[in-house]
Image: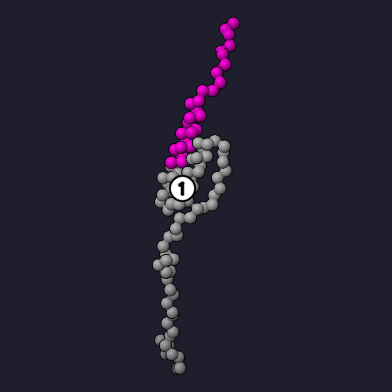
């Protein structure tokens, strides 16, 4: 073992590093993301897309409910398009 050098005082102790304050450790309040939604011109679809703005005021844990609701509404709107009657089918060719 080596002996301490003469005149050397005790080793300085490092100063404690302050941790985050209680205020800094809490999650931030919900804030709008600022994502713009361009209107489609179809009132029902625009209403569902506008519903996405509701997530801006919720904590992340509440986003899933809004997203599922919007997805369901948009899916129903697309399904309704399949139910609309289209133009009549062409008549089969006449038998020779």
> Any magenta on residue 77?
yes
Residue toward you, 17 or 52: 52
Q: Seen in the image, is 94 located left or right of residue 8?
A: right
Residue toward you, 12 or 39: 39
Number of dots carrying numbers = 1
Residue 51 in the image: above or below residue 60: above
Residue toward you, 34 or 2: 34
Mark 1: few, some, or many residues within 10 Å (few <14, many ≥20)? some
**Residue 88 picture quarter:** top right
Measuring 43% from the left and 69% from the top, which residue is drawn there? 20
> Any magenta on residue 72?
yes
Residue toward you, 31 or 95: 31
Residue 73: x, y in percent? 46, 37
Q: How is the image coloured?
A: one colour
Residue 68: x, y in percent? 43, 42
Residue 92: x, y in percent? 56, 13
Extreme residue in the bottom direction = 6
Measuring 44% from the left and 66% from the top, which residue is drawn there? 24
Mark 1 element type: helix
Q: Quadrant of the C terminus?
A: top right
Where is mark 1, residue-wise? 54
Q: What stretch is highlighted in magenta?
A: 69-96
Q: Quadrant of the N terminus?
A: bottom left
Residue 60 in the image: above or below residue 48: below
Residue 80 in the image: above or below residue 95: below
């Amino acid at each position: 073992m080596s002996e301490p050098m003469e005149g050397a005082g005790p080793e300085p102790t490092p100063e404690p590093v302050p941790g985050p304050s209680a205020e800094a450790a809490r999650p931030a309040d919900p804030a709008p993301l600022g994502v713009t939604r361009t209107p489609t011109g179809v009132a029902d679809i625009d209403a569902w897309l506008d519903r996405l703005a509701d997530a801006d005021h919720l904590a992340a844990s509440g986003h899933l409910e809004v997203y599922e609701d919007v997805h369901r509404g948009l899916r129903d709107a697309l399904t309704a398009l399949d139910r609309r009657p289209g133009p009549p089918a062409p008549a089969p060719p006449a038998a020779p």
